[in-house]
Amino acid sequence: MTNIGNDVQFNIYKQMHAPNPNRLPTQFEEWQKQAREILEDGPYEYVAGGSGGEDTVQSNREAFKRWSILPRVFRNVEDRNLKLGLFGDMLPSPVMIAPIGVQSIIHKDGELATARAAASMGVPYIASSASTYSMEEIAEVMGDAPKWFQLYWSSEPSIAKSFVERAERAGYTAIVVTLDTPMMAWRELDLKNVYLPFLIGEGIGNYLTDPAFRAGLRVPPEEDSMGAIMHWTRVFGHAGLTWEDLAELKTYTSLPIILKGILHPEDAKLALKYGADGIIVSNHGGRQVDGAIAALDALPAIVEATNNQVPVLMDSGIRRGADIFKALALGAKAVLIGRPCMYGLAVAGETGVRQVMNNLLADFDLTMALSGCRDLNEVNKGMILPADR
């Protein structure tokens, strides 16, 4: 059982008589503001921005406002249980860190700092194909802590196969296949800044260390870095994939395969048909299809379509504990946190990521308690109502 909300909150209040001008923020908006002050336009807007006019980014946040929590009272909520069993692991909470690439543009320690923060809390970390540090380096700093690997399915089959096999050897326990990025979207802020970090060698660490990728180079990347970068631009995405290709991926690994980026209930049914072990409802934080449905709005139909046959997770737009509560009430088994962790990374490295996650977990724990829930099973559709009802 846990009282993380009470503990984190009290530790902050204990500083009342000894003010600390360097104390880290508690508000999401302050983390973002400080990150904006630290980062240059290119890196900051690469993280904060979305595709097109950013309507999907805005919709993700507005979706949470369309639901209201309906608290219950006179329940014994002195102790809460946030633990979750998922794919054979017992996790301390239903919260994990989303796959985010090129973290080295945010902080020099990049993915290693975020991974260390996750490991120190037992929070699952999902390593991105587009990490600057290799999947093996990330796994090494995490030890036995829970970790998944996210695959951008390369147009070169041997690279996709190699990535998955490397991840399994390195100790990752699930493969997250991102489906919504066969190519990069029209991102106006990145185009304005003429900023794509991959073209300066950031975010391609897994490729530069991969034998299948290196086999396609005329000379090693150590001798011709720009040649390697240009090769990366040719093999990164794969717009020709279909559902039938999932069978081939399943021959590469015995790990659970979780499909990320599903928004349509018919795609959820196809995911089950073709053998997916889990689904992540996501619109990539609004970074791919401008004007797409908000992830939270898509969640209930996906949950209904899967009929509890596989776990359904969710990301995009989560900023506070109440958001986590609403996502779980609508059927998500767990949620993924993205931009808040990156703002924490920018402000204070590993410590910042840990503080962001502690704040979120504390907020969620207190929201559960004050809504009358002692266990995750009690966070269900009966605990929320449409806000306009």
Image: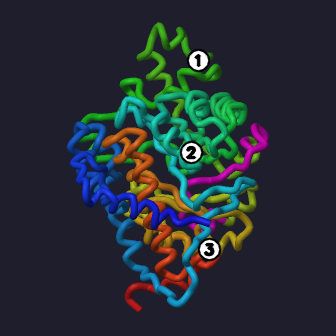
Q: Which residue is mark 1?
A: 214
Residue at the image point whose x is 75% and y is 42% from the top: 248
Q: Amino acid at mark 3?
A: Asp
Q: Secondary structure at mark 1?
A: helix
Q: Let me know if residue 141 appears in the view.
A: yes
Mark 2 to mark 3: distance in Å? 25 Å
Using the numbered discs, state the Cα–Cα distance from disc 2 to disc 1 in whole angstroms.
24 Å
Q: Identity of the amino acid at label 2?
A: Ile
C-beta proximity under 8 Å, tags 1 and 3: no
Magenta run includes residue 176: no
> Is there any visible trace of residue 281 in the rendered image?
no
C-beta proximity under 8 Å, tags 2 and 3? no
Residue at the disc numbered 2: 126
Marks 2 and 3: which is nearer the front? 3
Please name the amino acid that badge 1 sits on: Arg
205 or 196, which is in the foreground? 205
Residue 375: give its label: 3
Q: Which residues are magenta?
A: 249-268
Residue 12 location, x and y as percent?
Answer: 35, 59
Which circle marks residue 91 in the picture? Answer: none
Mark 2 or mark 1, whichever is nearer to me:
2
